[in-house]
Image: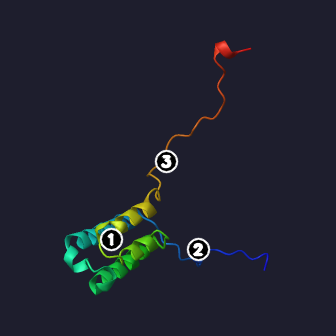
Amino acid sequence: MLGSAVSLLPPIPSGTVVPTTAARIRAARAIAMVADLVQIVLFPAFSEGALSPVNDALDVAVAAALTWLVGWHWAFVPSFLSELIPMFDLVPTWTAAVWYVTSGTLPPPGGPPGPPIDITPKAPPPALKG
């Protein structure tokens, strides 16, 4: 038992990695923003929190769509659970979670993100030469 490691992350079966493309990221961000906008604009229909079946159905659909588009991420769990709290629907948690998950996932077209950094030591200023 000493040699076995415990992981809090769900196992990732080989061959099931979601290909992250710019189109999938844009679609995930659009779905998250539309879901949050619907929950804010149609506030009276969603004000009951966990007691609203329409709110629950929307949240399950959004969670499934986002997981299908960008893959599973732990940031979706607090977003999903916070939607069950009454009045917390007014916070755009889906949008925040998707932006967190998809920030920096694609390198810019044409190569690595920026010029290489020169780390060679420079000569000391003349006043400090001994």
Question: Can you tell which of label 2 and label 3 is closer to the viewer?
Answer: 2
Q: Amino acid at mark 1?
A: Phe
- Mark 3 falls on what kind of element? loop
Rendered location of residue 22, percent (x, y): 39, 62
Quarter of the figure with the C terminus? top right
Residue to which mark 2 is pinned: 9
Alpha carbons under labels 2 and 3: distance apart: 29 Å
Residue 117 shown left or right of residue 43 in the figure: right
Residue to which mark 1 is pinned: 88
Q: Quadrant of residue 124?
A: top right
Residue plotted at (56% across, 40% down): 116
| Of pointers 2 and 3, the one earlier in the residue sequence | 2
Q: Amino acid at mark 2?
A: Leu
Q: Quadrant of residue 20?
A: bottom left
Asked whether the residues under the numbered discs 1 and 2 touch, taking CB atoms below 8 Å apart as contact, a structural biologist would say no
Question: Can you tell which of label 3 and label 1 is closer to the viewer?
Answer: 1
Residue 101 shown left or right of residue 32 in the figure: right
